[in-house]
Image (cartoon, grey):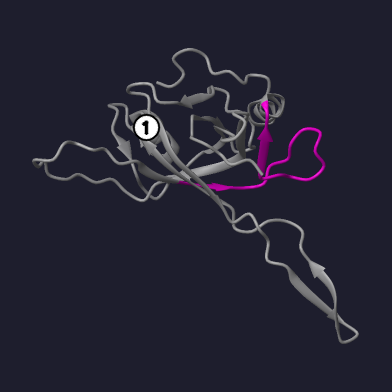
Amino acid sequence: MAVTYGFEKMTVLRLDKDLKKATDATPTEIKGEAGKGATSTFDLTGLKKDPKKIFGSNIAYFLLRKGYGEVAANFGLLDVPYELDHEMAGHQKTTGGVHLLGEDTEPPYYATLVESEDYSTGEPVAFGIFAGTFSRDGYKAATIDDEDFNPEPDEYVNTPIAKKLEGIEKPQIVGFAYGAEEVTELKGLLFGTETTPPEGSGE
């Protein structure tokens, strides 16, 4: 297995309720450009399914082992653009621009691509979440003191669901890619033919 080195960027694409590309959405990159956010950490957990023994004739006759566990992706992100942050949270917006959190708040689905590289070879490594919602637990403010300002990443959790992919029989939840060709294929599965965000899409 590749030893991932660094977290170069992530790309998100908003989906509709049918898990298809939303009509007004384009892929948005977070890749360290000033004012457009930067990636810090990525932690994908819950991949394994705990096997379950089925007994028959006084023995462990069969082992249930298909599928996956409680998959979640935890992100540390810096300076996510204001509008994108609230869009990811599903906050409604008044005509004057105020974002609202209420009983009808419903985060949209996103396709998400994480890009890194193999420490030993420099080959690109990517992880794709085909459909999932983002959440963050809160916002905070603190007093200014004598220390230099040192921004900390905000913590986001992506909760995936399985999605039916074209040409794949069963719904899938996560994709793994190693090398340029596989990464290109993964981008196609996530975003369709539009794999390269247009200029300015990170705003």
Q: Position of residue 182 (x, y in %)?
A: 71, 29
Image point 42% across, 46% down: which residue? 104
Secondary structure mostly taken by the magenta-highlighted segment of the chain: loop
Give x and y (percent) for residue 171.
74, 45
Residue kind at label 1, given as amino acid type: Val
- Where residue 190 appears, x then y in whole percent? 64, 31
What is the span of residues highlighted in magenta in the rendered image?
Answer: 157-179
Residue 175 sits above or below residue 12 on the image: below
Corner quadrant of residue 132: top right
Q: Secondary structure at mark 1?
A: loop
Q: Is residue 160 magenta?
A: yes
- State the image quarter where residue 110 is shown: top right
| Quarter of the figure with the N terminus | top right
Residue extending furthest toward the right: 57
Task: List the residue tagged with mark 1.
Answer: 80
Q: Residue at x 16, y 36 (%)?
A: 148
Question: Does the magenta segment cover residue 46?
Answer: no
Residue at image x 73%, y 40%?
A: 164
Answer few, some or many: residues within 10 Å of disc 1's Cα (few below 14, many 20 plus, some between 14 and 19). Answer: many
Q: Residue furthest front?
A: 120
Q: Is residue 122 visible?
A: yes
Query: Seen in the image, is 25 located left or right of residue 194?
Result: left
